[in-house]
Amino acid sequence: MPYESLPITVTIWLAMMLLWISVWDINHMRIPNIANGLLVISGLIVSAIYASGWPVQHLFGVVSGYLVFAVVGEIYFRWTGTDGLGLGDAKLLAGAGAWLGWAALPGLVALAAVSALCYALILKRQKLAFGPWLSASFLLNWVHQAHI
């Protein structure tokens, strides 16, 4: 496969993975670990190919993406006694960090949160799967970054 076709090929792979995650999360209110694991591994491989080595910002993106959401979810649980943000979302954000690097994560989360909040307010939803919103923001960021 020529190197020029790599962005399209990996974008199709990423879109398929994020669609799987989104549909599963909508139907089950959880994200399968296997999907998130494949997302992290494939993201690190793609990042290594683009950078000709293991880029530190993507490894840091995996760790920081997971930890930020895991800590927020734990704080929310201790404060309210209910789960508000699952570890599947934390693992999905870790996958985004693998693909995009840590610097893209704050904007990705902001776009996902604002979009999900608008949806919830318009449709008067109190509970919704956050994975699809993270996935959509993730894919938009990837397409913008990869100049697809």
Image: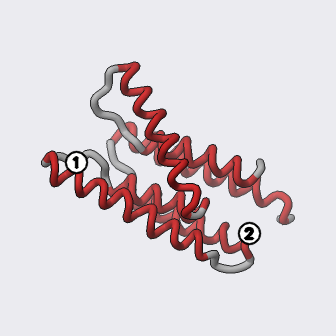
Residue 92 picture location, percent across and down:
45, 56
Asked whether the residues under the numbered discs 1 and 2 touch, taking CB atoms below 8 Å apart as contact, a structural biologist would say: no
Q: Which quadrant holds residue 137?
A: top right
- The kind of residue tagged 1 is Asp
Element under disc 2: helix
Residue plotted at (54% across, 69% down): 41
Q: Which residue is mark 1?
A: 83
Q: Is residue 33 above or below residue 41?
A: above
Element under disc 1: loop
Residue plotted at (45% across, 70% down): 63
Judging depth in this view, the residue of 148 and 2 nearest the camera is 148
Residue 86 picture location, percent across and down:
31, 52
Residue 7 picture location, percent across and down:
76, 56
Q: Is residue 69 above or below residue 30?
A: below
Which one is earlier in the sequence, the residue at label 1 or at label 2? 2
Left or right placement of residue 52 versus residue 58 in this view: right
Say which quadrant the N terminus sits in.
bottom right
Judging depth in this view, the residue of 113 and 95 nearest the camera is 113
Outermost residue toward the left? 81
> How dense is the environment of label 2, judged by Cα within 10 Å: few (below 14), some, or many (20 and up)?
some
- The kind of residue tagged 2 is Tyr
Q: Is residue 85 above or below residue 37?
A: above
Q: CA distance from mark 1 to mark 2?
A: 37 Å
Residue plotted at (51% across, 60% down): 95
Q: Which quadrant holds residue 10?
A: bottom right
Q: Which residue is mark 2?
A: 50
Judging depth in this view, the residue of 102 and 90 nearest the camera is 102
Per the rendering, the mark at residue 46 is: none
